[in-house]
Amino acid sequence: MSEDEPAAPAPVGGDIGVVLAGGGARGAYEAGMLATLLPELDRRGQRPTLFTGTSAGALNAVLFAARAHLPAQQAADEVVAAWEELTKNQVFRPFLLTALPMIFRQCLTRVLNPSSAPLAGLLDTSPLRTTLRTKVDWDQLHANTATGAVRGVAVATTACGSGRTEIFAEGHAAAGLPASDTDRAVDYTRTALDVDHVMASAAIPVAFPPVRIEPAGCWYMDGGVRLNAPIKPTISLGARRVVIVATTPLRDLPRLPDCGDEPVPSVQDVVAQILTGLMGDRMVEDSRTLGKVDELLESGAKRISPRGRPYTVVEYLFGGPMPGQGDQLGEKAEYVLDTCFRGVRRLTNPDLMFLAALLGPGASRGELLSYLFFEPEFTREAIKLGRRDAQIILDEAGDDPDKLWRTDSA
């Protein structure tokens, strides 16, 4: 991408952006969702030109951006194939063979030399670096942003030093980004994206080591720590319509009428609730804020913010599980574990069995497992769920554009 190249004009009606939330191996669901929506949007003359993502969503963002020059169906099929072929050995090295000895050595070293470097992460993610180099055509991605096939692609990270969200963005649309969004503690950097940016966005705290990004030399980790669904950055890139793709429902769960017989929550139950909050709460809040602003504008409210900036109606399409479906990805992970990994197959996958045993029985085991279940047996099922839910959305909308895009606060 050259800073001197003329800006590609925005599509008639404005850019359509895709927001891809984080979720580890659940990103396969997002790939299935967008793989079904993308060809239909293209048929309607509404092919997205902006892609932003966090963690696994960042991977999906660059996968789709690198294929924006292809026919929509071909691009969708290739991204789905990339997920279907993915295995955990392409994401991190075997835990039992590498992580446990590393932890033991680290503990021993710290005892003998307290000033030695601390442990950065429990898993060795060097295979993920190789995977990103082979599955993403970076030269083609840069070519697509240069020609305007992709007007902007961005990934969200969290700066380890400040705790602020850092958005790394490429493309002509990135030229109009502010340096910072002080209200949300978000900073923007226009750059040519590479493997390090996606590695940083996907660096799950504790599990994956942080990533250093040059030239500043700062350390970054998973963008989902503060901003799992970068809706506002997508709008800042110029989106006038936004497709929000996530693995959690848009609406809150109903309150249970009685919890008197509820068992004592386990550690994994608590962790699952924390993950649910990180992955979904901010997305729900931002989506509803977007809808409320749209409703106010359509009712004739003033179009200038208190800071003097103009408000604009931004229609959105939510692509994710329907309310009341429960944690379908967690249930699917549990099902795949019980049906596909039994007998001899368990012995050939000691890491998975160790993780399942560590999590123990309970409703939250499948949910937690689904974030690290990088195996074709699970990702293929997750893709099917994403495709199914996308088709439900399209069937309900029909050819009526007013039913596909919404401006309400859900």
Image (cartoon, grey):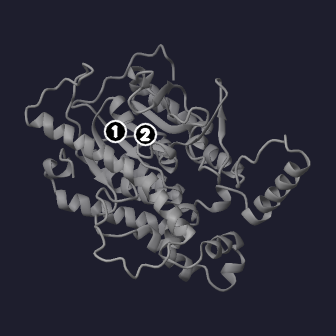
Identify the residue shown where x is 45% and y is 35%: 153
Going by the numbered disc 2, the residue's amino acid type is: Thr
Identify the residue shown where x is 68% and y is 60%: 89
**Quick one: label 2 or label 1, which is nearer the N terminus?**
1
Looking at the image, which is closer to me, 32 or 334? 334
Identify the residue shown where x is 45% and y is 46%: 228
Looking at the image, which is closer to me, 353 or 59? 353
Q: Find numbered disc 2 in the image and state the secondary structure of the residue it sits on.
A: strand
- Residue tagged 2: 52
Residue farthest along the left direction in this orientation: 300
Judge whether 186 appears above or below 260 on screen.
Answer: above
Snapshot quadrant of residue 16: top left
Query: For this view, does 35 lie left or right of residue 108?
Result: left
Residues at circles 2 and 1 in contact by the CB criterion of under 8 Å: yes
- Residue 45 image point, x, y percent: 24, 41
- Residue tagged 1: 17
Judge whether 339 appears above or below 249 on screen.
Answer: below
Residue farthest along the top direction in this orientation: 4
Going by the numbered disc 1, the residue's amino acid type is: Gly
Query: For this view, does 200 lie left or right of residue 65?
Result: right
